[in-house]
Amino acid sequence: MRSKACAEPSPAGNARQSIRAWVRHKLDWLNLCMEIYAERRTLAKLTDQQLQDIGIHRADVDAEFRRSVFDLPQQRKATWHGPTDCPPETRAKPF
């Protein structure tokens, strides 16, 4: 079964479905941004000893934490394609 976020192949007049897919895609993208922001906050709360244990320097954490909520790491952008239960040709395009 396809998700409602899929842009169903339809006549050009079916703008409502396209708008729903676009909105769903943007909400999914915003959710990813918020997840990464939460990860950055959690990392910033670690002690210097905990950071040393996992091989990360405080300066790197501070630089990562200062990034915008919408400034996502390239690796995360590359692996995110929106809803995955839609065929690739019908997925809403990223913005």
Image: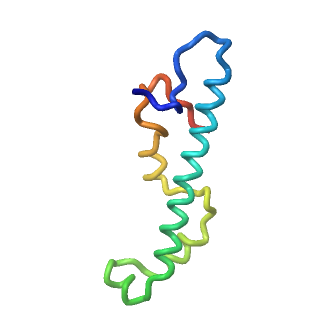
Identified at 47% across, 32% down, the residue is 3
Q: In which quarter of the image is the N terminus?
A: top left
- Color scheme of the displayed model: rainbow
- Camera-nearest residue between 68 and 42: 42
- Camera-nearest residue between 43 and 23: 23
| Furthest-left residue in this view | 53
Q: Position of residue 78 (x, y in %)?
A: 44, 45
* Quadrant of the rendered image containing residue 25: top right
In this rendering, the count of numbered labels is 0
Identified at 45% across, 44% down, the residue is 80
Residue 60 visible in this rendered orientation of the protein: no
| Furthest-front residue in this view | 1
Residue 93 visible in this rendered orientation of the protein: yes
Establish if 61 lies above or below 68: below
Q: In which quarter of the image is the C terminus?
A: top right
Q: Where is residue 58 in the image (x, y as percent from the top left)?
A: 47, 82
* Quadrant of the rendered image containing residue 68: bottom right
Identified at 59% across, 51% down, the residue is 30
- Camera-nearest residue between 14 and 60: 14
- Camera-nearest residue between 45 and 85: 85
Establish if 43 lies above or below 14: below
| Furthest-top residue in this view | 11
Establish if 64 lies above or below 46: above
Identified at 57% across, 37% down, the residue is 94
Q: Where is residue 15 in the image (x, y as percent from the top left)?
A: 67, 20
Q: Where is residue 38 in the image (x, y as percent from the top left)?
A: 52, 67
